[in-house]
Amino acid sequence: MKVYTTDKIRNVVILGHGGSGKTSLVEAMCFQSGLISRMGKIGDGSTVSDFTKEEQKRTISIKTSLVPVEWNDHKINILDTPGFFDFVGEVEEAMSVADGAVIVISGKAGIEAGTEKAWDLCEKYHLPRMFFVTDMDMDVSYHQIIEDLIGRYGKKIAPFNMPLREGSELVGYVNVIQQKAFRFKEKNVEPCDVPDYSKKYLGEYHTTLMEAVAETSEEFMERFFAGEEFSETEIREAVRLSILDDTIVPVEMGSGTAAHCVYNLLDDIIKYMPAVESRKVSGINMTTSEIFEANFDVLKPKTAFVFKTIVDPFLGRYSLIKIRSGIFKTDDVVYNASTESEFKIGKLYIMQGNKASEISELHAGDLGAVAKLNDVKTCDTLSTKTTPVQYPKQDISTPYTYLRYRAVNKGDIDKIAQAMAKITAEDLTFRTVNDAVNGQLLIYGMGDMHLDVVQSILKNEYKVDIKVEKPKVAFRETIKKNSDVEHKYKKQTGGHGQYGHVKIKFAPTGDFSTPYVFDQKVVGGSVPKNYFPAVEKGIAESTARGPLAAYPVVGVQATLYDGSYHPVDSSEIAFKTAAKMAFKKGFMEATPVLLEPIVTLKVIVPDTYTGDVMGDLTKRRGRVLGMNPAASGKQVIEAEVPQMELFDYCTGLRSMTGGRGEYSYEFARYEQAPSDVQSKEVEARAEKAAAGFAEE
């Protein structure tokens, strides 16, 4: 592929619900543009963009694929994204570098939750967009989909073409702007008459489009009311401007599997989607702390943003970049402000699915890749040392679904850690946590499917196996009443013995942020001062694993007020042991209770689902705090819920809302757990104690 200048580049993200036909459409675009000579099939695992073994096995997109194609002396960088919500991080990475979007709708399924989410993402990132209705080679109603789109998004919806059918077979299309019909003839088309059954809807769609054109200027408005016709050139220019300011959203139709009307889409991406140079972007000059207005200007110092990392056991490591200013060339020396390091980038590549091809240079606005830069991470900025620039990081979703994991083979622990580090570098929505307090290792993801895919990748690509289970809840233990206990530790084994005697009062502090508070009120030297630290150490060690259910202890006041010692047999170990025994006894006598973590939950759902969601939260022992309106007819429900009740909330919320609900939460405080929860945990602890706590 040749080098393209900034004005000849279009960066387009393909969005839509899972299974709507995005990958098939991208395959048709590759075929139509001549990148491939034969179209692959998803079922065969032979498409350009779904190239990983996991994608081929599951026949879904899991990763965002970059596929540049050439069309009419332009370069279109296609970003094929997953439609399943578990892989939203991949979509967000693509959105951060796209300049326009094509939202794919299946003609069979119509508007789905993924369609709405795609629209919302375009609103968030201020991206011009168009719809492409696929599966039109089947007997489906295009007019109904148009009506549904207008009902949801208003009169900005503007059909650009319509299906031409013979029976239920798609044989051509009607161009709404030109008001002409065309019939397919092999890879080309030939003009034909507009059939009578199409004229009614053609008139409606053309009038709607002309009204939108008229609103672009006063002159056009006057001409429209005077009954004058606009030229095709005037219409297309007015439409282009309206698409860029989001007052018109075109709708096109065709078939990805049959590659029908795909050339219209390619043409219109070049005609109507924004050129890179029309977009604005800025960062911070790290030397001067001034704003660096990059704006994809080739004359400014070179900068590039790393929007994605590929770490593959077979492909190697690639950092995918978008050039935001200047021109990058092979063997350029660049500077990474995040690591304050300067290095040579080596060769430049363009990625076409899993195929990397060398290229001599990349101009501002283009997407490409550099290889084997192990210290470069996603969201880093590559610039020059004389003009070190840092761009804002991507806005990536936070994962809330988590599982506990263990190595099937304990000898693989290090290999698993290394493999997970590579997956984490590639996938910003996957995280690992060493929960040392509760003695467990956790993996976080965007949903059950996401974590299942990670397990499969570990097993099939990195040859290590893990088993997952429900994680332990981060319970805490405390006391509600006071107690006064003593313990005398006395041991004689020949020679020096062991002797430590303490009297300690225990009381609740009410402060669950600290394990304990230690104080001493010893008078008369009954316990020498040099043993006070040993007593406190015994208390501290005891709080790590509470006597009630082996959870960490919080909110306990321990006051040493009396005791005794032996001038020969007393030691720090003896007093520490005595304190630990006293703690166990005093804690259990002071009405011990289990505390559970409470989180503040925010759920964003369409109005129609608020009743179901609030009812479900009540079943989960939640307390609804309030409800506030949000954009696009949605509501934000705020509630406080025990964290243990949210273990399967991702799946439950998606089921209730058809995938339209979103949620987030953060820790709020600890509260006393209900008696049934406490008794269940105490019983489980007793069973583990009987087994000697062989495995936590």
Image (cartoon, helix red, strand yellow):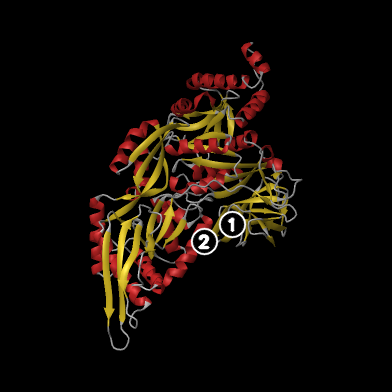
The residue furthest right is 299
Q: Is residue 572 left or right of residue 137?
A: left
Q: Position of residue 61 (x, y in %)?
A: 47, 49
Q: Which residue is mark 2?
A: 422
Q: Which residue is mark 1?
A: 377
Tell me which residue sits at (34%, 65%) in the image.
560
The residue furthest bottom is 495
Tag 1: residue type?
Answer: Lys
Tell me which residue sits at (45%, 29%) in the image.
145
Mark 2: few/some/many CA within 10 Å (<14, 14-19, 20+): some
The residue furthest front is 524
**Is 107 in front, or is 418?**
418
Q: Which element type, helix, strand or loop, lies under badge 2?
A: helix
Tag 2: residue type?
Answer: Lys
The residue furthest top is 226
Q: Position of residue 405 (x, y in %)?
A: 38, 61
Q: Is residue 322 above or below residue 130?
A: below
Q: Position of residue 397 (x, y in %)?
A: 49, 47
How far, Cα to Cα, is label 2 from label 1?
A: 11 Å
Q: Position of residue 58 (x, y in %)?
A: 42, 52
Dot placed on the residue nearer the N-terminal end, 2 or 1: 1
- Please tell me how many numbered marks the rendered image carries: 2
Q: Is residue 221 above or below residue 335?
A: above
**Is 355 in front, or is 385?**
385
**Is 446 in front, or is 472?**
472
Tell me which residue sits at (68%, 16%) in the image.
219
User: Quadrant location of the C terminus?
Assistant: bottom left
